[in-house]
Amino acid sequence: MSKVNLSKSSYCKCVQCEKILWLNQYKKDIAIAEDKESVFETGKKVGEYAKRLFGNYVDIPLDKTLNERIKKTDELLNDKANVITEASFIYENNFCSVDILKNDNDGVEIYEVKSSTKIKDIYLDDASYQYFVLSNLGLNVKKVAIVYINNEYIRGKQLDINQLFNIEDITDIALEKQSEIKANIEMINNYMAEHGKDNEPIKDIGKFCFDPYSCAFWQYCTKDLPTPNVFDISGMQKRSKFKQYYGGNISFEDLQHTNINKKYLEQIDFELNNREAKINKKAINDILNSLKYPLYFIDYESCQYAIPEIEGTKAYQQIPFQYSLHIIQKPGASLEHTEFLADINDENLIRTFAESMIKDMPEDGSVIVYNKTFESSRNREIGEMFPDLKSEMERFNNNMVDLMVPFRNRDYYTKEMKGSYSIKYVLPALYPDNPELDYSELSMIHKGDEASNAFLSLKNKTPQEQEEIRKGLLEYCKLDTYAMVKIWEKFIEAVK
């Protein structure tokens, strides 16, 4: 029996679900994966910084062939190079590259680098697999450790990588997992030998489809489920969805008489019986009566740096870099618009953002947002970073009104919202077939994570590309606040 070529990543995928390997080999084209470019870029950047943890190092380029990388590793080990990054090894078709390999006179140490802020179980499988490969090649592996981000570290003027990273010794866990890894590799080889191209394995879906990563083959593996089904219920936890699924309650018809949360039953009822819109006029009026002119409709965009680039910030802190602001000064006044988009090279962009916002919202009008948790949290963080701005940030928060509340509370609900109160569902439900309010009609950026990734990409772009991206960012954020204006107008119409 020929053995399967396994890398550490493919081994970890098989730990999640062995069928992933079969699908990757024989039906790769049906995968529907999220855009992971930003994730890869983050991992790459974190890896480059982590390589400096142990001083000088010799790097093995990943653009070389597998055989070249393995040969180069052997040469460096023989030459007693102390720190090797991307050292590559193969044992009986089981391949791995070690992020950081410390090569001492009495053995080696494996350091697996992760851009996460905590250690996940799958990281233990990853690092333990590397121990399996190296130890079976005869190397004395003294230590296995996970290197990950310390998100309690606040950056000073200079970045301190020794504080940025945590290093946790998991050698004992790696040793305990060796028999499990050997058994898993044998199982994987038998599995792939048994199931050839025309013999697709049968495997039911489960929570593992989303843990530790969302599977790119989910749509394929659920293609025969009725539409809509339990996995289309908005807000229900996955473990609850699978409990219903395994209990045979899969379609909305199956679920309509079960003992589940009434808001889930409401989504099912509206879908099956095509109910008319439900509007609690008192709740809508309460929102409208709470508003005070001028009305400031505002939305922020933010990004996260795994390696904090701004003094006073932590890894993965939400950094507000943009806002759109629609203003109505008094009843009957025309709609005004202003906006802010930071310079990617502004080392003080958070303060620049805040000062621009203070200038644009000088009066004590209602600060109208959609999901106040996000904007109010950013304002508190700004106040903590810059005490001289704290009172203004508190003023904004004290005047904040959340247009999401009636939708979250189901005081305004239609079938088309599909159980969600996200503005991306609410807006088309309130204004169907309106291209002016259709995010898919935007030229470049259509959702928040795209906006964040676009802003982060600016540093590596030409001036012309930067101009195009900035135009797309402004266009996207402007629609977010214009959407809030249109929701406010729909509230006024609903209570007449």
Image (cartoon, helix red, strand yellow):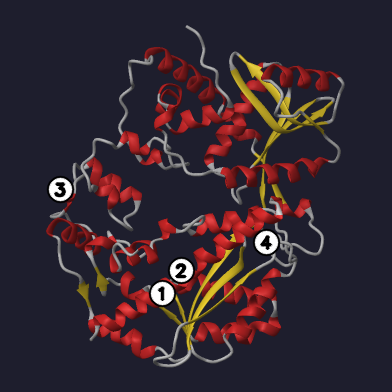
State the residue in front, 268 or 476.
476
Q: Secondary structure at mark 4?
A: loop
Residue 199's disc is none
Q: Residue at x 86, y 38 (%)?
A: 56
State the residue in front, 235 or 63.
63
Q: Amino acid at mark 1?
A: Met
Numbered disc in front, either 4 or 2: 2
Instruction: Look at the picture and state if 494 lies above or below 423.
Output: below
State the residue in front, 20 or 249.
20
For residue 458, say whether it is visible: no
Instruction: Quickly name the residue at label 1.
Output: 484
Q: Amino acid at mark 3?
A: Asp
Q: Quadrant of the C terminus?
A: bottom left
Alpha carbon distance from label 3 to label 2: 37 Å
Q: Earlier in the sequence, mark 1 or mark 4?
A: 4
Picture coordinates of residue 159 (x, y %)? Answer: 79, 57
The answer to whether the residue labelled 2 contacts the one labelled 1, judged by CB atoms less than 8 Å apart, is yes
Instruction: Quickly name the residue at label 4.
Output: 314
